[in-house]
Image (cartoon, coloured by chain):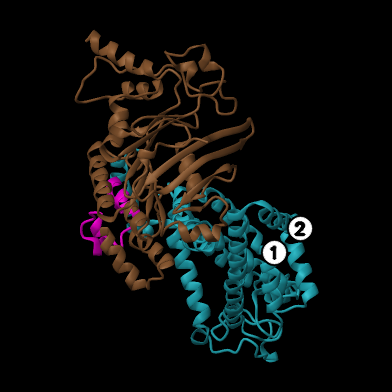
Amino acid sequence: MIGSGAAVLGESGPVLDVRDLHVEITTRRGVVKAVDGVSIDVPRGEAVGLVGESGSGKSMTLRAILGVLPPEARVTAGQVLLDGTDMVPLPTSALNRIRGPKLAMIFQEPMSALNPVMRVGWQIAEGPRVHLGLSRSKAAERAIELMRRVGIPDSERRFRAYPHEFSGGMRQRVMIAIALSCDPEVILCDEPTTALDVTIQDQILRLLAGLCRESGVSLLFVTHDLPVVAELCQHLAVMYGGQIVEQGPVAEVFAQPMHPYTLGLLRSAPDVEEVRSSLVPIPGSPPSLITPPPGCRFHPRCGFAEADCQVEPPPLRLLPGGRATACLHYERCAESLEAEEAAR
Amino acid sequence: MSAVSLITVAPEHAQPRRAHWFKQAALMSGLVIIAIVLFMVIAAPLLTSYNPDLQNLNVTLQGPSAHHLLGTDQLGRDTWSRLLYGGRVDLEVAFIAVLFPFILGTVLGSVAGYFGGWVDLAIMRLVDIVVAFPFYVLIIALVFVLGPGQRSIYIAITVVGWVSYARIIRGEILVAKRQEYVLAAQSGGLSNLRIMGRHLLPNVITQAIIYAMSDIVQDILAIVTLSYLGLGIQPPQPDWGTMIADGQNFLTTHWELTTIPGVAVVIVGLGLSLIGDGLADLLRPGES
């Protein structure tokens, strides 16, 4: 069992507490351990970023939390505690009372996540009608108010528009309005800005950050975009091969990564303030999750790997300052950064 | 897919649909044909002064004349009048008959496609069983067992006809339920019933409506065939199938008695098929 640092916990404790979550997907080629012992705390009113490559299990983690896994996937172990209630064993009817009013989700593709033949206003009003028992007109009023809050101009008229009449950024605002419609405690975001233009991305991030501050909503923000995490989140968890390899406060992890994979991610991301001569890609490709490499899953791609890395899967070790790493030789990261500094 | 391309493409795609539906030659000619036919059968009392059932044995088997536009049959009944009133019955029965299999097939197809698993297996095996029989064999057998009449026609057409709708809707739902908006609806805590009814069906019902247009043609043919065989609309009510059957005996001397209702069936069938084709072109995404 992997625990996260005490400093990560807010004063009132985490609103969402994922403990040792395992998700397996049955495929023709074997069982894929898509999520393999992931633990994340989301403190009340704060934003946690979950970062990793495509296929590292980020989206599966989110879908497992919500209980909307594809039919071939299932949770094999672990708990998802929302306000102390474990959601994993709950039947759909009970989950439907949580999804929406307590836990909401924003998707990557705002076009495909909106019903193309339903007016956007009614899509926003649907949650309040079902979960809060509002009348048609009251729900419509609420939807118009929400559209105004997320910055959709002329919301009375746009209420009756269809999704295809909106631009990408406006559609994502609609998605945010839907997520907010029942005043949830936590919003799960699955790369909500990836499909958008950079300028629009920034607007949406500011909007999300502002709304969270206003209403005290917590965010679990999945992305592969490190600058986005830096802008929005207080905490960061890095996922690799279905496991969390590093955790900690965003600023500190960025300043001093303690896992070679995090270091690789930072080096492969373009940085405006500090123009590097070249981006350094991480060599190799993500591990097979049907037959993961023995020991540390990152060792075949790791420049610092030694013999002991191949023996046993390294546990996520707690470090001072609310940080945690699964690297046996994490000091190497600091040494490597210093050497780089010295060379310059 | 970039956000920019979506913005520009979407309105252009939406515009021609509404603006140019009347430019569809097939749809327009089908609509005109069916509108004329419907007007004629609905306004039948205005277009003819003869009672279609009134026998006048003094004027049997006459050719077209000023009194009898299309002549008379072997019992002296006005053919024009029987054609109009017969069309009334046939079209009414066909339009009602298409509704039941449409509803039943759509509901069962949605359930099968959405839930999958054993529900899907059970419903689709039922479909296979019905499909294994030729359409007319099953219809005629059912009406024969249930006894002739309109009620039996409705039941038989429903029992045999729902399978096509179920197959179409199931296939569409299988694709649509993988869409992200369904996942989003589930994530929003909506019930399965609500997701099926409010989110999936409006997205997939188009295909069933298109099919229903061609299905009405099949239903009219089935009704006419059953009546021809004496299992459908019962005399003295006029009906195209009965007219064709009655006229058969005089085929060598008065071929028009059989031909006129036959041509009427062909014209209605053509009109409905054209509407079906036109609608398909209009509503199917990516073909406008």
The question of residue A28 being in magenta is answered with: no
Q: Position of residue A280 (x, y in %)?
A: 33, 17
Q: Is residue B6 visible?
A: yes
- The amino acid on which the numbered mark 2 sits, given as a three-letter code, is Phe
Judging by colour alone, the chain drawn in brown in this rendered image is A
Chain B tint in image? cyan
* Residue occupying the far left of the picture: A273
Residue that numbered label 2 is attached to:
B133
| Dot placed on the residue nearer the N-terminal end, 2 or 1 | 2
**Circle 2 SS class:** loop
Looking at the rendering, which quadrant does residue B165 occupy? Answer: bottom right
* Residue occupying the far top of the picture: A343
Image quadrant occupied by the C terminus of chain A? top left
- The amino acid on which the numbered mark 1 sits, given as a three-letter code, is Val
Q: Where is residue B235 in the image (x, y as percent from the top left)?
A: 71, 83
Mark 1 and mark 2 in contact (Cβ < 8 Å)?
Answer: yes
Q: Where is residue A44 in the image (x, y as percent from the top left)?
A: 35, 50
Label 2 crowd bin: few (<14), some (14–19), many (20+), radius 10 Å: few
**Discs 2 and 1 share one subunit:** yes
The question of residue A156 being in magenta is answered with: yes
Q: Where is residue A251 in the image (x, y as percent from the top left)?
A: 27, 32
**Circle 1 SS class:** helix
